[in-house]
Image (spheres, rainbow, N blue to C red):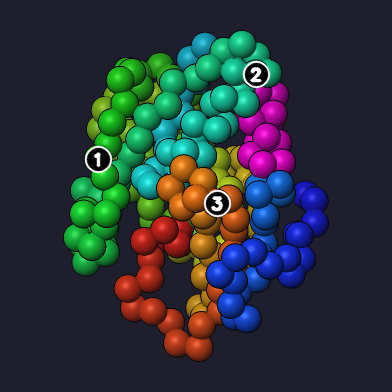
């Protein structure tokens, strides 16, 4: 993988924050992930992307657009909320209002499904997403694409297509901002002296 863009600063970055990926680096990683999907998926006609709300959805849309440019085939894109499938009821309740709803207009039976998320950490969100997909049908395969892996795994889940990996501790958070939702493309590492008990939404649990 290419190097981190160092200590690059953007608007509203505090001394406790470091830019891991600026907009140019993020675009390169997303494009590379799309290339890897094209190289590794045998049957693009049966490929579909399911973005995990919220930031997984615009990432899935971008990947699908890259795939279309490369192959003239644009895989369908849907969204997964996962909130009803979580095993941590407290966090699930907090997420219901902010996440949105599951929606896709294709049958998952016989499909190659790629789940798309912004940050991978404990793996519980991905487990929930897989459980939700299986309730809708039986895909041929389920794979995972994530922009950032920040470590801290609690379940044996790994990304098949990964943009960037960084090891973080309990005082560090990774924030992904996207133009579609936040008005800019940037991945920020933030260090806090005290962990936030409510932190988790958007942190890749």
Q: Quadrant of residue 30?
A: top right
The stretch in magenta equals 27-40
Q: Which percent across, then down, holds residue 187?
A: 59, 58
Q: Is residue 34 magenta?
A: yes
Mark-to-mark CA distance, 2 and 3: 23 Å
Is there CB contact under 8 Å for labels 2 and 1? no
User: Which numbered disc flags the more N-terminal residue, 3 or 1?
Assistant: 1
Residue at x 36%, y 61% (from the top left corner):
201
Q: Which percent across, then down, holds residue 46?
A: 48, 15
> Circle 3 sits on which residue?
184
Residue placed farthest to the bottom in the image?
193
Residue at x 19%, y 60% (from the top left corner):
93
Camera-near label (3 vs 1) is: 3
Camera-near label (2 vs 3) is: 3
> Circle 1 sits on which residue?
101
Quarter of the image that includes the C terminus: bottom left
> Circle 2 sits on which residue?
69
Residue 158 visible at all: no
**Nearest the camera: 93 or 113?**
93
Where disc 1 sits, the SS reads loop
Magenta highlight: main SS? helix
User: Which numbered disc flags the more N-terminal residue, 2 or 3?
Assistant: 2
Where disc 2 sits, the SS reads helix
Asked if 46 appears above or below 147 in the picture, the reply is above
Q: Which percent across, then down, holds residue 171?
A: 52, 80
Residue at x 65%, y 71% (from the top left corner):
18
């Amino acid at each position: 993988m290419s190097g981190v863009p160092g200590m690059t600063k953007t608007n509203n970055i505090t001394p406790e924050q470091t830019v891991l990926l600026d907009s140019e680096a993020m675009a390169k990683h997303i494009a590379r992930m799309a290339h890897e999907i094209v190289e590794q998926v045998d049957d693009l006609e049966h490929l579909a992307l399911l973005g995990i709300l919220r930031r997984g959805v615009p990432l899935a849309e971008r990947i699908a657009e890259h795939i279309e440019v490369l192959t003239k085939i644009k895989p369908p894109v849907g969204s997964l909320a996962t909130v009803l499938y979580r095993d941590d009821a407290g966090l699930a309740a907090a997420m219901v209002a902010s996440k949105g709803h599951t929606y896709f207009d294709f049958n998952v039976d016989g499909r190659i499904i790629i789940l798309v998320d912004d940050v991978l950490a404990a793996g519980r969100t991905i487990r929930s997403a897989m459980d939700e997909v299986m309730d809708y049908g039986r895909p041929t395969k389920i794979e995972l694409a994530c922009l950032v892996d920040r470590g801290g795994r609690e379940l044996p889940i790994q990304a098949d297509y990964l943009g960037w990996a960084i090891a973080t501790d309990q005082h560090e958070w990774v924030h992904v901002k996207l133009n579609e939702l936040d008005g800019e493309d940037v991945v920020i590492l933030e260090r806090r002296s005290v962990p936030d008990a409510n932190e988790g939404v958007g942190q890749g649990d």
